[in-house]
Amino acid sequence: MLKPDTEEALADAIQSAQSPLRVLGGGTCGALSDGEGLDVSALSGISLYEPGALTLVAKAGTPVSEISAALAAEGQRLAFEPPDFRTLLNTSGAPTIGGVFATNASGPRRIQGGAARDFALGVRFVDGAGNIIKNGGRVMKNVTGYDLVKLMCGAYGTLGVMTEVSLKVLPSPETSGTLLVRGLSEEAGVRAMSKALGSPFEVSGAAHCAKILDDRPITALRVEGFEKSVAYRMERLKDLLTPFGAEMEIAPKEMSDWLWEGVRDAGKFSDMEGDVWRVSCKPSDAPRLAELASGIACFLDWGGGLIWILTTPGVDLRQRLGQFGGHAMLVRASRDTRRALGTFQPEAPGVARLTEGLRQRFDPRGMLNAGLMGPALVREET
Amino acid sequence: MEMPTPDAAILARKSRVVERLQAVLPADAVIHDDRETRAYECDALTAYKCPPMAAVLPASTQEVSDVLRICHEEGVPVVPRGSGTSLAGGALPTADSIILGVARMNDVLETNYDDRFIRVQTGRTNLSVTGAVEENGFFYAPDPSSQLACAIAGNIAMNSGGAHCLKYGVTTNNLMGVKMVMMDGEVVDIGGAHMDAGGLDLLGLICGSEGQLAVVTEATLRILPKPEGARPVLMGFDDNEVAGACVSDIIKAGVLPVAIEFMDRPCIEATEAFAKAGYPMCEALLIVEVEGSEDEINHQLSLIMEIARRHNPVELRESTSAEESAAIWLGRKSAFGAMGQINDYMCLDGTIPVSSLPFVLRRIGEMSEQFGLKVGNVFHAGDGNMHPLILFDANKPGDLELCEEFGAEILKLCVEAGGCLTGEHGVGVEKRDLMEYQYAPADLEAQMAVKDVFDPNWLLNPAKVFPLSVSENRRALPVAAE
C-alpha cells in the first residue's frame, strides 16, 4: 500500500508505478478495482474556510466528518447530503471529501440542490502520467477554460487522483419537516412526488418506499427552512395532495431524520442479501422499470429519478431493464459479478469513444483504477 | 488583438466549399457574398471584427452534421454562433472560417412538467425557454442579462450565469442532456431527462467549452416551479467595505437570497442621470432579493434589514409593491445602458472571493486614476462575480488599447485576489492571452488534451480560449504578427 503524504510524493508514486494502482480515500466504497493500493488519506486538512463566502478548501483525504463538524460550527453544511455506505457495503474507514467528489456521491437533496459535482468549485489532481494539474478555483462562478472539475467528479479516480478540492457550502436550515403519505402505489407515489416537486414549496427530499414502517407503502416529502415557513409549506403540500385520497401525517423529528438517513445510505438493504443497484431514470419511468427489474426489493428517491434495487446475486439487471433513458450502476456485488457485469452501464459507441480518448490522454499507461470504468469492460462484453 | 493569419489555400477553395455547402443546404442558408457576410463579422464584443469566408444557417441536426462533415473534409475552421451576444468574442470569425449559426433551430421539442424538463433546439433564446413553460407555472433559471436575445447554444458554450444563480446555479447546474455534432459530422447524445452521468461527466465538460468541442443542437434543460413571490430591498452605504461586510453577514446568518447586486458610486451616478430610479447617492448600493410566500418574504427581509441596520446604512428601502420592486430594479437593469450613454465601455467579469471585495474595489479605483479611464462597478455580490465597466472613447486613437491594458490589469488583480478571469462571459478572444496568468502550462495542456480528443484537427473555433502561442502546434494554421 502506497500512502504519500504530499502532493509531490503522490505524483512521484504514480510516475514510478509499474503496475496499476487502486486509488482509495477512506476505502468505504470497497475494492472497485485491482492493483496496489494508493491511499490518499494522508493528504488531509481544511486549508481555508470562509463562511461569509460559502466556500471551503480541503485536501482530498480530509474526512467528511471533519468538514461537516467545521461547517456545523458556523451553521452551514454540505448541501448535497453525501451518503455513507459503510453499513451497506460492510466497510470501515472514514469517507473522505475526495472520495465523495470522485464518486459524485449525492443524497436525497440532489433533487433540489444539485449533485456533489454541482458544488465542486476547483480541484488539484495528479494524472496518470504524474502531472500535477489544477482546474477551477475557489470562487462560485468560474468559466475560465474547460471545466475539468466536473470531469474529475464521478470519474472514480480513473483520470487522475485528486489532492485538493474547493467547494461551495450552504447555510443549514433552521428546521425541517417530513410529510408522510401512506398507502399509495408506486405509480401514484411518483405522481404525488411530481406534483409536490412541481409546486413552489421547495421540496428537498421525495422518496417512496414499500413496507418500511408498517405494511403500507410510504411516500415521504421533506421541506426545510425557517420554522414558520416549513409549517406553512407542509400544510400547503397536504392541500396539494388531498386529491390522492391517502392518509397523511407529519413525521416526528426523530422519525424524519431516521428516514432520510436511511434513504440516503440505502439502509434498508444493509442487512438483506443480494446485489444492490442504483438506477438513474426519468421519474415517470420508475414504476415501469421497477416492475421490469422484478428484484427482491426496491425503493425510490429523487422523486422517482433514482431507483434502488436489490436483486438475487449475479442477476444482470441491465438486461432485464432493456433500453431506457438512464443508466444502472452496480453498487454492491461479489467480485465475480462485478467483473462479469461491470460497475457502470456500457456507453453508446460515440460516447464510449470520447471516454476512451480522454482516458488515453489522462492515464495513457492505464495506471489508475484500471478497468473500473469504460472501454476495458465494454470490450469484454461485446 | 492577434488572430491567426487566414490560410490562403482555404480562401482559394472558397467557391468549391460554398458549392458543397449549397448542395446540402437550402440556397438562403448559405451566405457567401462579401457584403452579406459582414453581418457576421463580430458579436457583442464589437471592438474586434472580421467577416467570415461564409456563414451557414442550418435548420436541423442533420444539416449541421452535413456542414461539419464538409468543413472537416475541406479542412475549414468552423466558428459556431448562437445569437452573437458574446461579450468575449466567442463568435468572432477569422477570414478563412465558416460561421455556423444555429438561429434557425429554435423549436421546443418536448415539455414534460411531471419530470420537470424541456427539450429545445439550441437556437432558441434563453427567455423564450421560460416563455414556453411559464403558463404552467415553471421557469428556466439561468438568466443572463442578454436573455431576451441570447441563445441556449451560447449559454451552453459559455456556461452562462445571471443575477439569480446564487440560489439556482448557472447553466451547467441546469443542463441535463445534449445532442451534439462532432467536427467530423458524427451525432452524439449525452445525458437526457435523467439525472447525472452514467460514466464520465462529459456533459459538464461540454458546458463551458466555448464551442470548441462540438456543436450542440439540442438541449434538455431542467425547469423549476416559479416561486410564490419575490421582493427586493435596497440599501445604501457610505463605504464599500461596510457593504461587503453586510453581504457576508447576510450569508452567514443563514439567509440565502436569490440575488445580491452591488453598485458603486460611479455606477450609481451614471444610472441616476440616465434612468432616474431614485437611488441614494452613496458609495455602495445593494439590492437584495428574496423569494417565497408572503410570510417567508417578510420573515427573510426582516432578518436582512436587521443585519443591514447594524451596518449603519444611509438608506434602507423595502419594497411593498410590484411598482416599488420594479423601481428598485430599474437602475440596476439600466446600468449598462447608462454607462453606454456616457461613452463606449468594456465590460469585464472577473470573479473574486467575496472577502476580497473592499481590497479589489480600492485597487480598481487607484488604477482608474493611473490609467485615466473611468470605471463603474456593477456586481453579483453574493458570488463575487464583478462587472467593472471601463469607459473609453472608441474614436480616440489609442483609447481602446489603453482600455484593454487596464482591463487586463483588473483581471490579473482578480486572479491575485484568489479569483478568476471570467465568471460567466467566457474566455473567447478577450481573455485568451491572460490564460497563462491563471493556469500553469500543465493546466492548459490538460485542457487542450480534451480538445485533442473531441476535435483532433482543431477546426472548431480554434483561435479562442488558449493563447495562440500555446495552441500554435495544434492548430494547422500559421500565426501572424497581428
Image: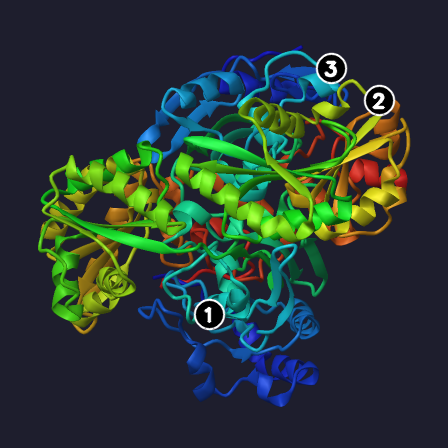
Q: Residue at x 32, y 36 (%)?
A: B251
Spatial CA distance of label 2 from label 1 is 54 Å
Q: What residue type is labelled 3?
A: Asn
Q: Do the residues labelled 2 and 1 touch (CB within 8 Å)?
A: no
Q: Which amino acid does label 1 sit on?
A: Thr
Q: Front-most of B439 and B468?
A: B439
Q: Front-most of A330 and A352?
A: A330
Chain letter of mark 1 equals: B
> Which image quarter is the C terminus of chain A in?
top right
Report x, y in % for residue A148: 54, 41
Chain letter of mark 3 equals: A
Spatial CA distance of label 3 from label 1 is 59 Å
Q: Residue at x 41, y 76 (%)?
A: B41
Q: Looking at the rendered structure, which numbered label has been put on residue A90?
A: 3
* In this view, A357 is above or below B153: above
Q: Residue at x 38, y 60 (%)?
A: B88
Q: Nearer the viewer's eye, disc 3 or disc 2? A: 3
Q: Looking at the rendered structure, which numbered label has been put on residue A335?
A: 2
Spatial CA distance of label 3 from label 2 is 14 Å
Q: Nearer the viewer's eye, disc 2 or disc 1? A: 2
Q: Characterize the local packing of mark 1: few (<14), some (14-19) or many (20 or more) Cα atoms within 10 angstroms.
A: many
Q: Looking at the rendered structure, which numbered label has been put on residue A367?
A: none
